[in-house]
Image (tube, rainbow, N blue to C red):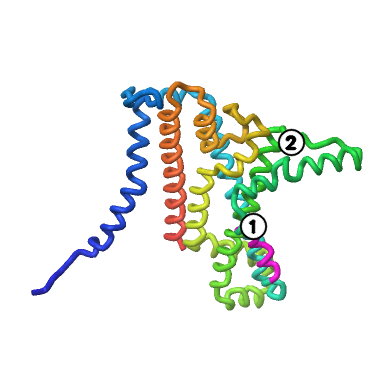
Amino acid sequence: MKITSSPYLFIIPTIIALLLVEGYPIAYSLYLSVTEFTPATPEPVFIGLNNYARMVTDWNFWESVRVTLLYVFVTVSLAFTLGLSFAILLFRDLEYRKRLQTILILPIAVSPLIAGIFFSPAAIWDDINVVLKYVLGLPIINVFNPNFAFTMIVIADVWLWTPLFMLVFLSVLQSIPKETFEAADIHGASGWQTFRRITFPLILRSPVTFIIITIRSIDAFRSFEIPFTWAGWIGQERLGSPIDTLSVMMYKLLSFPVFESPYSYIATIALTLLAISLVVTASLLKIGNKVWERS
């Protein structure tokens, strides 16, 4: 007797594991978001969409959404640009590729928290201000300036993740046939023309490019460690500071509660963050599919 089985049966264990690991927390967060829960209450009380109504009218929430979206866009864009620049540099400079590549990928080994601390006032800016004021006689840098703080956390994030983009783009460049570049040289194309008409389009058309952009964007949406290192300098307990990503805002709500039921409100914000990241991810994948269909 011939036994036939559906290939989908082999992925059932994976689906069950995903439901347990990811489905249960999402379902429980959804339950908390429509209830009022505090450690003092024995059972959560159903309140419907009150937490969502509070979130919509909460100025601090919208400020954190703005900061998060700006943070994701700036960090991913800069890491993409610098990673592409370094990849082209290493691809062309065969003599120093191994030395430069080793140096440029070192930030990958650093944890995000350490990267944030490295660029924080306690690490270098206090010493720089001492040199500026007492040695050079120049005005000191105001580390409490919101724009300066946001700039530093962006630089720390870009410094940390640029090597990943560089390695991905370098692998894409190495997969392009050498004959393509040789043909461009024979026809007298300049370096800029080769980049604009060959290198950059081929990198954009690579599925790996959009996959790494999507993964990095998802990770940037939940960024916490690097902005957290500046929380003490820009008002640790104050909501609505210029470095409050949604993850930092949820941390502050948990550590310095300003509402009667912070757990339920935090669950509401977490679900909203999940929804925003899913929308952005779906948009990126849709753009990627259109690019692949044209190529």
Between the residue at mark 2 and the residue at mark 1, the CA separation in whole angstroms equals: 24 Å
**Left or right of 112 in this view: 266:** left
Image coordinates for residue 220, horizontal then vertical, percent: 53, 46
Instruction: Judge whether 200 appears above or below 37 on screen.
Output: below
Mark 2 lies on residue: 143
Give the residue type at disc 1.
Pro
Instruction: Judge whether 73 appears above or below 166 on screen.
Output: above
Give the residue type at disc 2.
Val
Look at the image and say whether residue 107 sits in the magenta stretch. yes
Q: Residues within 10 Å of mark 1 (few under 14, many from 20)?
A: some
Q: Give the residue at x 68% y 74%.
A: 94
Which stretch is magenta? 99-108
Q: Give the residue at x 42% y 60%.
A: 293
Mark 1 lies on residue: 107
Please identify the quadrant where the N terminus is shown: bottom left
Look at the image and say whether residue 137 sits in the magenta stretch. no
Question: Which of the two residues, 191 or 49, is positioned nearer the viewer here?
Answer: 49
Q: Are marks 2 and 1 in contact (CB under 8 Å)?
A: no
Q: Which of marks 2 and 1 is nearer the N terminus?
A: 1
In which image quadrant can residue 66 be found?
A: top right
Image coordinates for residue 137, horizontal then vertical, percent: 91, 38
Q: Give the residue at x 24% y 61%.
A: 8
Q: Is the magenta stretch mostly helix, strand or loop?
A: helix
Question: Which of the two residues, 108 or 42, is positioned nearer the viewer here?
Answer: 42
Instruction: Judge whether 72 appears above or below 200 on screen.
Output: above
In which image quadrant can residue 110 be found?
A: bottom right
The local secondary structure at tag 2 comes to: loop
The local secondary structure at tag 1 comes to: helix
Instruction: Judge whether 33 appears above or below 285 on screen.
Output: above
Mark number displayed over residue 231: none
